[in-house]
């Protein structure tokens, strides 16, 4: 019998450590803390930077808006999703789309719109499988949400 090898535990970056939708000044302070600088157009050109900040603020606004149950309707959620898709595309944040859609699906679930929660959840899962991988905590998280939707639906006999 050999003892199992032990590995030093490396700090794992999670979404909470990496808020990619930060506006410029916060982003710069964050990467400075790691000794990084960035020369991308969003960080250097003033006009692109301002437009980028508006879009990233847009992400926060959308996520905040959908948390209120009165904003959870088919029309508003579809608009929010289309806007998020547009912003992540423009900002080169497509890998984060699944995380954002997960939050929207979660808000739909909280508002007990199960049909919408499933629809957006399935969209989120597709994005997570593509960007994070099938065998990944970020995909599992969405799968758990979809299972919860099923469970609630069955319990309510729909
Ligand atoms: Zn940059």
Image (tube, grey):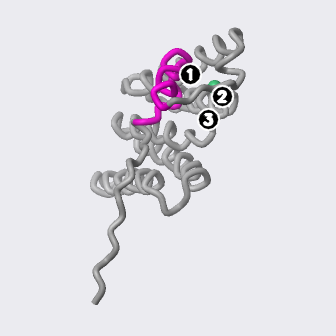
In front of the other: 22 or 74: 22
Q: Which residues are magenta?
A: 17-34
The x and y percentages for residue 28 are: 53, 21
In this rendering, the count of numbered labels is: 3
**Residue reaching furthest to the bottom:** 1
Estimate the spatial distance between the alpha carbons at disc 3 and disc 1, rounded to whole Å. Answer: 10 Å
Q: Is residue 120 magenta?
A: no
Q: Quadrant of the N terminus?
A: bottom left
Q: Which mark is residue 91?
A: 2
**Could you tell whether 89 is left or right of 6 in the image?**
right
Q: Residues within 10 Å of mark 1 (few under 14, many from 20)?
A: many
Residue at the location (63% across, 18% down)?
52
- Magenta stretch encompasses residue 23: yes
The disc at residue 93 is 3
Q: Quadrant of ligand 1?
A: top right
Q: Is residue 54 left or right of residue 30?
A: right
Q: Is residue 30 left or right of residue 149?
A: right
Residue 79 location in percent, x, y? 59, 27
Q: Which residue is mark 1?
A: 56
Q: Residue at x 48, y 54 (%)?
A: 139
Dot 2 or dot 1: first in sequence order is 1
């Amino acid at each position: 019998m050999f003892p199992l090898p032990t590995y030093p535990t490396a700090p794992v970056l999670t979404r909470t450590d990496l808020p990619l939708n930060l506006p410029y000044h916060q982003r710069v302070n964050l990467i400075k803390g790691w000794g990084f600088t960035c020369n991308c157009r969003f960080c250097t050109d003033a006009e692109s930077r301002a437009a980028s900040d508006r879009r990233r603020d847009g992400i926060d606004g959308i996520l905040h808006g959908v948390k209120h149950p009165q904003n959870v309707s088919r029309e508003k959620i579809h608009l929010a999703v289309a806007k998020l898709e547009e912003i992540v595309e423009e900002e080169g944040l497509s890998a984060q789309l699944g995380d954002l859609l997960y939050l929207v699906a979660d808000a739909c679930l909280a508002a007990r719109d199960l049909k919408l929660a499933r629809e957006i959840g399935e969209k989120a899962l597709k994005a997570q499988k593509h960007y994070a991988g099938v065998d990944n905590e970020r995909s599992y998280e969405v799968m758990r949400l979809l299972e919860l939707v099923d469970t609630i639906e069955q319990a309510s006999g729909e």
